[in-house]
Amino acid sequence: MPERSVPVPLDELDRRIIDTLQGGFPLVEAPYRAVAESLGLDEAELLARLDRMLSERVLTRFGPMFQVERMGGRFVLAALAVPEDRYEAVATLVNALPEVAHNYRREHAMNMWFVLATETAEGIDRAIARIERETGLVVRAFPKEREYFVDMRLQVRGGRHG
């Protein structure tokens, strides 16, 4: 995905929305309505602001975190060493796969790192084989050995860009 080079201005309501949604989401029939009401706005405005922040890449993802292994699936961190002149084309191929959850560029011989997540354990091998077939590059897969939970919440209220 293309990186944003200039900060996007956030107003106080955007900041309150981000702060409110970190670390919790109500498990009720109409969760967006409940969040909107807690912020003093209507559901349509909350959804419009979330859509805008996603499209402007203020938020790169908004959704639940699943323990995929508990549901029979699997995920791995994977890396590719992509020639610079092919980087964008390979990124487009990799990002087009529904199994790719995140993709990060790194300053390293293995310059493309991404997370593969599949509904079945066997799905990882199929996704890796497809990437290797379509790119002609070797995928290095790094399965999880141990899991850590870091509850990191970043307060965005009162920043200089809003």
Image (cartoon, helix red, strand yellow):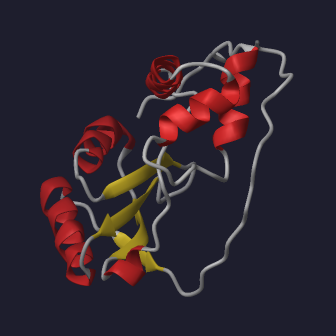
Left or right placement of residue 103 versus residue 35 in this view: left
Q: Position of residue 134 (x, y in %)?
A: 14, 55
Q: Position of residue 23 (x, y in %)?
A: 67, 53
Residue at the limit of the structure toward the bottom, as seen here: 145
Q: Is residue 9 above or below residue 36?
A: above
**The N terminus, quarter of image:** top left
Q: Is residue 144 above or below residue 57?
A: below
Q: Position of residue 29 (x, y in %)?
A: 43, 47
The part of the image, by quadrant, that contains residue 161 is top right
Residue 36 in sight here: yes
Left or right placement of residue 105 versus residue 149 in this view: left
Residue ID at (21%, 74%): 123
**The C terminus, quarter of image:** top right
Residue 60 in sight here: no
Using the image as rendered, state which of residue 105 and residue 31 is in the foreground. Answer: 31
Q: Is residue 80 above or below residue 60?
A: below
Using the image as rendered, state which of residue 149 and residue 135 is in the foreground. Answer: 149
Residue ID at (43%, 49%): 103
Q: Is residue 120 above or below residue 4?
A: below
